[in-house]
Amino acid sequence: MGQIISFVRKRLLGRFFKSTERCLSRQSEEISDDLEDPNEEYTLLFSTPELLDPDSDSDGGKDSSFRFHQNVGTTCIDIVEENRQDPAACVLEERQLAGAPERWIRHYCSSQRMLLVGEGDFSFSVCLARAFGSATNMVATSLDSRGFLFRNYKKAMVNIHELRSRGCMVLHGIDATDMANHCYLGAIRFDRIIYNFPHAGFCSDEPGESQKRRHQLLISLFFKNAKEMINENGEIHVTHKSNGFFLDWNLQGLAAAVGLRLKQEVAFNFTDFPGYRTKYGFGGDRNFYCHPSKTYKFGLFTTISP
């Protein structure tokens, strides 16, 4: 009887390990295909920075269909292969040198732990990194895959290389509406979370009210996630156009609905950030007109002790 039980155990364990091996092999092949297929079509659910101005004569909206994004599982591969880091080091390290002087650019400081969301060609992140002289305090993310960026933004790869050389963690496939559940980012508490010109996509034949609701859903879900990722005194910055259709998004109301308060709003001038380029989403490598715009700063409500 003991020999029979031993034989059955060996057969069951053998099947289990073979099944696991096949599963891992399929996953590896799928990731490899995502990275290597140059003809893969990438589409967006929630766009990286894009602002299609109704008054603009740009041709950036030629493809008017609103399609879904195919997230590519490259995050861990990027960290291991590109940054040459141990995956266990993905939680942001305290790498600022003791006693190093703070450096500022506008309302951003080298001592602040920052998360940048929805980057286009990563030119805003590079601007901050150059001002700080280092990017060890930054995590810069995009919804787009690395392959999409390579094909659609001519300076994206150069910018990403510079960020990594300055110590920045760069992640792709990061959804602003679900980032609090990310395996690495969800473990970090940031001083600043920055989202410049969020946009949920464009469809020319969609009624204006329906478009507004899609944009509001993006912002609302972003606020909900970002709230869980800032420290007690942290701030969430959204830079947004401040006229016409864009005012109707009601950022302050959306923030209040998830427990955030507006602390300050300041005029935004992209010339304050040398090298920053306001790129269209969906792969448009042209710059959009961002005037007038404001940076809205949100924070947690102050808790009053009894």
Image (cartoon, grey):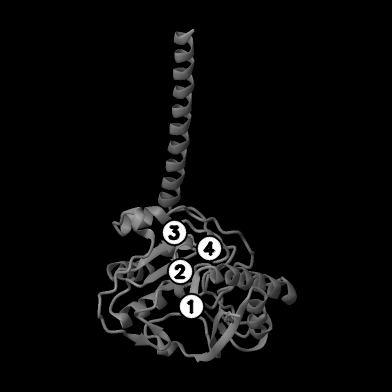
Residue, disc 2: 189
Question: Element under label 2?
Answer: loop
The CA distance from mark 4 to mark 2 is 10 Å
Residue on which the image places disc 4: 180
Q: Are marks 2 and 1 in contact (CB under 8 Å)?
A: yes
Kind of residue indicated by mark 2: Arg
Residue shown at 52%/56% (left/top)?
71
Q: Nearer the viewer, mark 1 or mark 3?
A: 1
Q: Amino acid at mark 3?
A: Tyr
Circle 3 residue: 184
Where's the C terminus, which quadrant?
A: bottom right
**In this view, 275 is above or below 85:** below
Badge 4 local density, few (<14 within 10 Å), some, or many (20+)?
Answer: many
Secondary structure beneath dot 3 equals: loop
Give the side of residue 94 with respect to residue 51, left or right: left
Q: Earlier in the sequence, mark 1 or mark 3?
A: 3
The amino acid pointed to by label 1 is: Gly
Q: Please, what secondary structure does the residue beneath circle 1 have?
A: strand
